[in-house]
Amino acid sequence: MTDFTIKLTGTEKDDYIKDRFPEPEPTPEPTSGTARDIINAFEQTNHLGGLDTVYIIGDSDNWDEFIENATQAIYETEVIYYHVAMAYLSENDPSLGESLALASEQGVEVDSLSSGILATLHLQQEMLSELYEIEEFEDSIFED
């Protein structure tokens, strides 16, 4: 085997990059009108729009499974940066009353509290509340 370098320029370089690193397949849009309605409902909420609704719907066979998958995705959501957590808390829970109550309910020790934990707990609670507000779609999304 020999070592050599080939200099690619212009369209040769572009073609090489396209062949070597193909674009990822776009996520398919759901064909069901009701699935589209759920995605729109998620996007219109304050907090649920960040979830991968298409994946959650596609990975669910019935409403209970959909709620379970969405709930799991919510519990995997975290606020990890200090400045993001502080901005979230100052806008959504400036007194920290709700966040501290949630932390207490879940048994979080005082010495392990941080703005990220408080913001995450509050955000997850808000997302769960919004999730249960879209139950109007229960009867129509998963037709037997």
Image: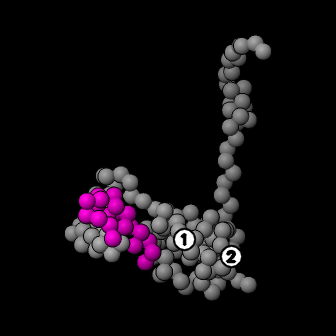
Expressed as whole percent of the image width and height from the top left, the position of residue 20 reads 71, 34
On the image, the x and y values in percent for residue 62 come to 66, 79
The three-letter code of the residue at mark 1 reads: Ala
Q: Residues within 10 Å of mark 1 (few under 14, many from 20)?
A: many
Q: Which mark is residue 92?
A: none
Q: Residue at x 36, y 72 (%)?
A: 106
**Residue 38 visible in this rendered orientation of the protein:** no
Q: Quadrant of residue 104?
A: bottom left
**Which stretch did the figure color magenta?**
107-129
Decide whether residue 109 is among the magenta residues.
yes
Whether residue 143 can be seen here: yes
User: Pointer 2: residues within 10 angstroms few (<14), some, or many (20+)?
Assistant: few
- Helix or strand or loop: what does disc 1 sit on? helix
The residue that disc 2 covers is 61
Q: Viewer-proximal residue, 108 or 144?
A: 108
Q: Is residue 39 left or right of residue 61?
A: left
Could you give the CA–CA distance between mark 1 and mark 2, rounded to whole angstroms? Answer: 13 Å
Q: Nearer the viewer, residue 24 or 64?
A: 64
Q: Is 18 a magenta residue?
A: no
Residue 47 in picture, x, y percent from top left: 43, 67
Residue 133 versus residue 42 in the image, above or below: below
Q: Label 2 amino acid? A: Asp
Disc tally is 2
Residue located beneath label 1 in the image: 70
What kind of colouring is applied to the model shown?
one colour
Residue depicted at x 47% and y 66%: 75
Left or right side of 21 for 90: left
